[in-house]
Amino acid sequence: MSLTILEHGDGRFHFFHGDHEVGWLEGRTIAFVNWEKASAARMAAEVAYDALSVWLARQRITDPPPRRGRPLRTRYDGEGLVLTLFGNPVGRLTEPENAGAAHGFELRLPSQLGPTLAAAQVIHQALSKHPELRGREAVEVLEGSEFYV
């Protein structure tokens, strides 16, 4: 299924698969939610981070920063789980606020890039092609509930 993007007119965008909200872009934060377990959201964050790094390197005509096969690590910062690479924060995992909602992740976009919807398309494509994430069913969400923190 393709990614549908809804603009709110104030710099915020929400991403949908059919009737289900699966992510958003707000300021320098891009997020995707749609996983029943935190472990799947963490794997999706790694896939998204790698895809975003490669795409950004192509935009800048440079090599992507190496992750050297190391997983993104997490640490608790008092508000939730922060995703780090070599000790530097790159995003966070999001947890559902209510039963039936989805786990997800947020990644920070580099300041020199500016908010861009192309990053959402790159991440969406990487997630939909990944063999361990491709077959996951969307989490049913009650109408009016919000996925993110």
Image (tube, helix red, strand yellow):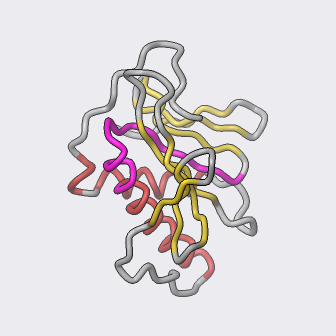
Q: How far across and down, in percent of the image, does residue 80 sit?
A: 56, 46
Relative depth, front residue between 125 and 107: 107
Which quarter of the rendering shows the N terminus? top left
Residue at far top of view: 143
Q: Residues in magenta?
A: 28-43
The residue sitting at 51% across, 72% down in the picture is 85
Total marks drawn? 0
Residue at the far right in the pictured view:
10
User: On the picture, is 28 further left or further right than 51?
Assistant: right
Residue 9 locus on image (x, y percent): 76, 32
As for residue 66 lying within the magenta part, the answer is no
> Along the line of sight, which residue is nearer the eye, 81 or 28?
81
Q: Above or below — where is 98 with respect to 121?
A: above
Q: Name the image quarter holding the C terminus.
A: top right
Residue 95, horizontal then vertical, whole percent: 47, 37
> Eyeballing the image, is 126 above or below 95?
below
- Is residue 74 positioned above or below 64 on the image? above
**Residue drawn at point x = 68 percent, y = 66 percent:** 110
Near-viewer residue (134 or 73): 73
Residue found 21% across the figure and 43% down from its top: 135
Look at 75% across and 40% down and name the residue there: 11
Question: Residue 6 is drawn in which quadrant?
Answer: top right
- Horizontal and vertical percent position of residue 84: 53, 66
Q: Quadrant of residue 136?
A: top left
